[in-house]
Amino acid sequence: MLEVSGLTVEYAATGNAGGGNPVRAVDDVSLDVKPGEFVGIVGESGCGKSTLLFAIARLLSPPAVVTAGSVTFRGENLVSMTERRLNAIRWQNLSVVMQSAMNALNPVMSVGAQFADALRAHGTSSRKAVAARSAEVLRLVGIDAVHLGSYPHQLSGGMRQRAMIAMALLFTPDLVIMDEPTSALDVVAQRSLMTQIKELQRELGFAVIFVTHDMSLVSHYSDRLVVMYAGQVAEAGLTRRIFDRPLHPYSRGLLEAFPSIRGAKVHLSGIPGAPPDLSVIQNGCRFSPRCPAKLPACETTAPALLDREGTSVRCLLYDPAPAPATAASLSLTRPRQSRRRRND
Amino acid sequence: MKRTLWRALARSPKATAGAILLAVFIVLALFPGLFARDNPTAEAYPRNLGPSAAHLFGTTGLGQDVFAQAVYGTRQVLEIAFGAGLASTLIAALIGVAAAYLGGFWDGALSLFTDVVLVIPLFPLLIVIAAYVHNSGTGVLIAVLTFTGWSYTARQLRSQALSVRSRDFLAAARVRGERAAYIIAVEILPTMISLLVAAFLTNALYDVLFASSLQFIGLGDPNSVSWGTMLYWAENNEALQAGYYLQAIVPGAAIALLGAAFALLNYAFDEIGNPALRPVRAPRAGRRLASLRTRRPVNA
Amino acid sequence: MTELLRADHLTRHFKIGGRLAGGTLHAVDDVSFAIGEREIVALAGESGSGKSTVARLLARVYPPTSGTVTYFDESGTGKPLSALRSRRDALRYSAQVPMVFQDPFSSLHPVFRASHGVLRALKLHRPELSAAERRAEAARAFDVVGLGAGMLDRYPHELSGGQRQRVGFAQALATRPRLILADEPVSMLDTSIRIGLLNLMAKLRDDEGVSILYITHDIASARYVADRLIVMYAGQIAETGPVEDVLAAPRHPYTQLLLSAVPDPKAPPPSLEAMAAAAGERGEPPKVIDPRPGCRFQPRCPVATDLCATVTPELLPLGSGEAACHVAQSDVEVKAFS
């Protein structure tokens, strides 16, 4: 239903940072979402996951610009679509839930007024119909319809996020994109919201793209997982498979950075270092400075995204190297023209 | 941070224009003798002459050289602009930020005081005060303008300081044991530099206009050399009705240009302080569409 | 255990609303606990539980409405915080009990360099040092928290969130503290970076001998780094005890709810019935305004009795810790949430 293909998003050079190089926040990312699927996108801050989300939803503003790739939604390319067609699709078929309800909801309008706004923008004009639909979506997310008259600051954090989700479901879209909707919530409210989303998904059948930095959050709810690092896809596949047997050293490091409340207490070390500065052109694998399983070739050869038993992984460890380096030689691997990524 | 400030100033065309304009006026104020040969007050020439090689802008109804007057008058205007502008901004900063930081009773008291001064009708007050202390020079004018000019800025700065007050680094300073005076001066004020500069530039602009207006209606010292007094004498002389346009236009244009300089710098500082206001040039659409490639999606 | 700090019946109320329709918000009610030397005590609870208010009471941001906090200095003599009136006493306390804040993006002053807070703290609390000695001490503090001395001259916007939080800890360390109040220091960091900070906290306890009051809503990180756990709900303490004991056998129904809600990637995914049961639990702690007596968790508690609705439970010793629950205190095994 949604097919992202080779999407690249760049921030135009500001001139101050990085000596004028455009920052490639999203680099050649491809993923697809089937109807009714729950896809989680996981990564640290700055890995490009939010930019990717905004690019898919056509919410990018200058200086960020899509410089390559396509986003095909129900057969149409969102990247090159006109504003008119976009307005027709937005909210009817594709809606977005932002990270912080306090920032996304209008603080001076009541919740009901904002619902009415959205409904009228897409054709529902009779007051009765607007009121009925607003009450219905609130009931779906478990909020009493009396709160239609409340202002956002009068609702608790959890209720605000639910109201946002209700607004996103006004037209029962095919795809709902969520950008870290639970980050401001406590753990009990978080679980409640996640199970609510899953239930709604089962009931209404929409697909979800869920962006987060907290991998354990999506572990129980997502069907497939995409792990991003420094603007690229590091690993992608079925959630269960990635959790049971993470292939990329970054995914492994992420999984091991979670202290568990059950089982033995072990010392964890996390992933040392910090994500790279994207305004500096990288040679080789972007994760190599922090990688515990680094090979000498990793510094110079940028790995391609390969398929390993149904999971995609971007790592030289899984690359059938043409010439195995002998212990003594530090020679570079032969460049593979067909699959070699541009070193940047 | 200072280096980025200079670079930002140099890049913005508004800032460069404003800075150059202001610099010209400052140089004129500092070294008037280099530019105007004549004594501005000497009534030495034939009256109401038109522009010529000897008198660039002609002469006044009293036989003074208009160009010399405009050049020598710059100094007083700039004294007023910078003096009153700086003083009112400083007072506004101290009162506004102290009110926001101290909160409670002090906030109430200081805000009440600010509001009372704020609602006093400015121009009538200026007229009344100036009428009582007429003929006493620039110092009094600066004092009067300062007293009436700080309250608006104080409210602005108080609001800004209120929003900064909840930031953790201030709580950290409190918990560390810093005194209130230190926190106000060293921790809060530096975060508001762009607002302070903007307030200063706005105040300076309005002070120039107000001072000139007062002098125009005759409440300054009519024997001093200033653009406002030039307008006063031009009016006295019925210059516009009689067709001696330059006598009125020259000081008016000078006021307008100085005001423009302050305004341009104000816009530029806004852009520096708030990157969202900077003009953004999006890349050309052609490049974007031409580089669309398709690849097989990765099937997970 | 040598006591460092003891809170007795600590209470803090806030007046909210106008003169006509006002109420009293009971942020913290009758909280008593102690922190000893060389231990990390985790104070866990959701937002609105009062944990941040407790931290600010201990940091003397505002005085308590009632109750006392007693601080024991090196000689062992305890003085209530209200008795620290002179500037010298106040400075000495804030040197020995500093605070680390939650938000790495606003806890450092954006205009000054990263070393600003550390140098100011040294200037205020250790005036005997010369400028060069202060700089050396700042470098040492940065080194202990894992930042290079080169970071001293960087600006906050050039540092990552994790690095900024480390600067926060360095600021606390500069004054040779005995107890650090850490108010949710890792909540705003990415999950992969939290471990580094948690390891740092453990190192501070082990190598520098500093106690830490670790305030958090994340039970898993509390387990990882803390020795003892205090669980707060709606301004009161629900349960305390050694962290492993509380997590292995939680007695208070709220503790059980918290534990059941923590997502564990290594556990199998929950069944549909478990998810349906969980969806009913909205996760909204109450805003405690003018409360009536009775257990505050009772509206959400599946095992509540009539007693729970009328009589406020006391925090009584139970097993290796304490719990404030009528049902748990009646020797019945509580199995409220799985």
Image (tube, grey):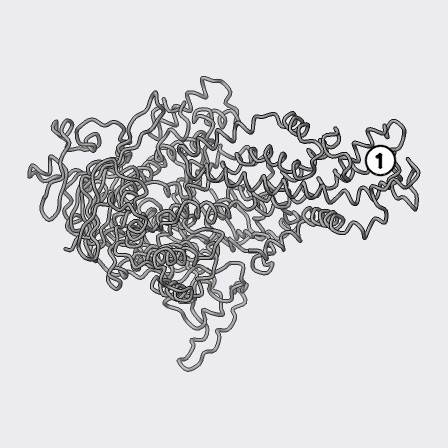
Residue C158 versus residue C84 in the image, above or below: below
Residue located 39% across and 27% down the image: A137
Towards the viewer: A264 or B165: B165
Name the quarter where the C terminus of chain A is drawn. Answer: bottom right
Q: Residues within 10 Å of mark 1 (few under 14, many from 20)?
A: many
Under mark 1, the amino acid is: Gln
Residue located 69% across and 39% down the image: B138
Count of numbered badges drawn on the protein: 1
Residue located 55% across and 29% down the image: B117
Towards the viewer: A66 or B178: B178
Q: Is residue A307 left or right of residue C276?
A: right
Residue A154 versus residue C126 in the image, above or below: above
Name the chain letter of the residue that bears numbered label 1: B
Regarding mark 1 in the picture, which secondary structure is present there? helix
Image coords of residue C80 (percent x, y): 21, 45
Towards the viewer: B81 or A234: B81
Image coords of residue C86 (percent x, y): 30, 47
Residue located 87% across and 41% down the image: B57
Q: Quadrant of residue A191?
A: top left
Q: Which residue is mark 1?
A: B247
Image coords of residue C122 (percent x, y): 37, 58
Residue at the outermost left position: C331
Image coords of residue A44 (percent x, y): 41, 53
Residue B131 versus residue B165 in the image, above or below: above
Q: Inspect this view and state whether residue A340 appears.
A: yes
Q: Inspect this view and state whether residue A230 appears.
A: no
